[in-house]
Image (tube, rainbow, N blue to C red):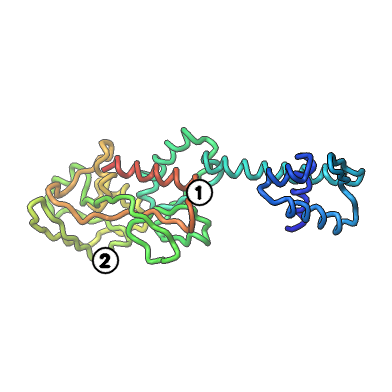
């Protein structure tokens, strides 16, 4: 590393025309610049630069060596410039995970808007209802329902949604005892929910599943087809094209908080920041 520093300073001395000018442009003292040059020549066993009180000129060995040092500084300058540009403009890959329900209805629409303004962004979507390990799976941003207990992750609450007991229109009007409950596997083998109306009155709902699926999309398809009733997020049920109807429109279940998680210690990369902001805005507009 010291060699690279010596070479960089040497190139600045040549291009500045003097040690004094190089010291000013680098923000170093003349003695420090002189020491860099002296150490470099001693380690190489070559005289690179001949200096008088009024001028300096490169030796043949110095001319050849300078051409390499010049390229070194150019590569460093380009790397620095490109790094700064990445901070300004989202570019390259970002890997995002979310539960199936949130991915299709929240994350993907938000990132689609981002791509219209940032075409060089390359999103990778990982839909999973499991809480994936961000480091192992190389996840940049995770959207989850509920807070995480992993203290190594940074997390921020970005909004919330409510689940709604719903069914197809024709089914929702049938006698209540005729309803078959379609359960996601996480709901367990006995369904028990408590709902509240605007006046604070509570109502308990209990049922035994007639069908259990480990996929949100399977549950959604079965409920839409009229095979039974079930629990779905409000941003799905409230869509005009959902074909779903709440069973108890005057009652609400408790809200489910949504969190954004990442493992970055310092400032968020621009890719993550832009995508996170878009997802948060999408969630706010859906409520």
- In the rendered structure, the answer to whether residue 131 lies left or right of residue 42 reads left
Q: Residue at x 86, y 46 (%)?
A: 49
Q: Which mark is residue 269?
A: 1
Circle 2 SS class: loop
Q: Nearer the viewer, residue 153 or 72?
A: 72
Left or right, 262 with respect to 188, comes to: right
Residue sitting at 87 percent across and 44 percent down? 52
Determine the CA span between mark 2 and mark 1. Answer: 43 Å
Q: Residue at x 59, y 44 (%)?
A: 83
Give the quadrant of the C terminus: top left
Residue projecting furthest to the right: 60
Residue 182 rendering spot, x and y as whole percentages? 26, 55
Q: Of the numbered discs in the image, which one, if any, rests on residue 189? A: 2
Looking at the rendered structure, the secondary structure element under dot 1 is loop
Vertical comparison of 236 with 184: above or below: above
Q: What label sits on residue 124 in the rendered view?
A: none
Which x, y percent locates residue 207?
19, 61
In the depicted view, which residue is nearer to us: 88 or 147? 88
Callout 1: 10 Å neighbours few (<14), some, many (20+)? some
Nearer the camera: disc 2 or disc 1: 1
Quadrant of the snapshot with the N terminus? bottom right
- Residue 249 percent coordinates (x, y): 14, 47
Task: Report the residue at 84% width, 39% height from top.
Answer: 55
Residue 248, above or below 135 = above
Task: Pick whichever, 84 or 251, lies toward us.
Answer: 84
Q: How many marks?
A: 2
Q: Nearer the viewer, residue 213 or 276?
A: 276
**Disc 2 vs disc 1: Cβ atoms closer than 8 Å?**
no
Q: Residues within 10 Å of mark 2 (few under 14, many from 20)?
A: some
Task: Classify residue 195 as left or right of residue 272.
Answer: left
Q: Position of residue 64 (x, y in %)?
A: 87, 44
Residue 24 location, quadrant: top right
């Amino acid at each position: 590393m010291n060699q690279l520093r010596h070479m960089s300073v040497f190139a600045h001395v040549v291009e500045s025309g003097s040690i004094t000018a190089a010291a000013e442009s680098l923000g170093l003292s003349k003695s420090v610049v002189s020491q860099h040059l002296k150490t470099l020549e001693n380690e190489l066993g070559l005289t690179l630069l001949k200096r008088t009180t009024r001028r300096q000129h490169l030796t043949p060995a110095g001319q050849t060596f300078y051409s390499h040092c010049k390229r070194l500084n150019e590569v460093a300058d380009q790397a620095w410039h490109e790094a700064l540009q990445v901070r300004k403009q989202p570019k390259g890959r970002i890997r995002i995970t979310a539960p199936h329900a949130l991915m299709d209805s929240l994350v993907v629409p938000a990132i689609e808007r981002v791509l219209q303004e940032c075409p060089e962004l390359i999103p990778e979507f990982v839909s999973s209802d499991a809480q994936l390990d961000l480091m192992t799976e190389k996840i940049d941003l995770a959207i989850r329902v509920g807070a995480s207990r992993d203290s190594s992750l940074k997390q921020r609450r970005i909004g919330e949604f409510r689940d709604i007991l719903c069914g197809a229109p024709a089914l929702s009007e049938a006698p209540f005892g005729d309803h078959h409950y379609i359960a996601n596997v996480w709901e367990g083998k006995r369904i028990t929910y408590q709902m509240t109306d605007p006046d604070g009155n509570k109502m308990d709902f209990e049922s035994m599943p007639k069908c259990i699926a480990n996929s949100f999309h399977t549950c959604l398809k079965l409920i839409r087809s009229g095979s039974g009733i079930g629990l779905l997020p409000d941003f799905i049920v409230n869509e005009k094209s959902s074909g779903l109807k709440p069973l108890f429109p005057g009652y609400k279940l408790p809200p489910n908080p949504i969190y954004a998680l990442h493992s970055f210690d310092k400032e968020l990369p621009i890719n993550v920041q832009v995508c996170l902001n878009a997802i948060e805005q999408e969630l706010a507009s859906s409520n």
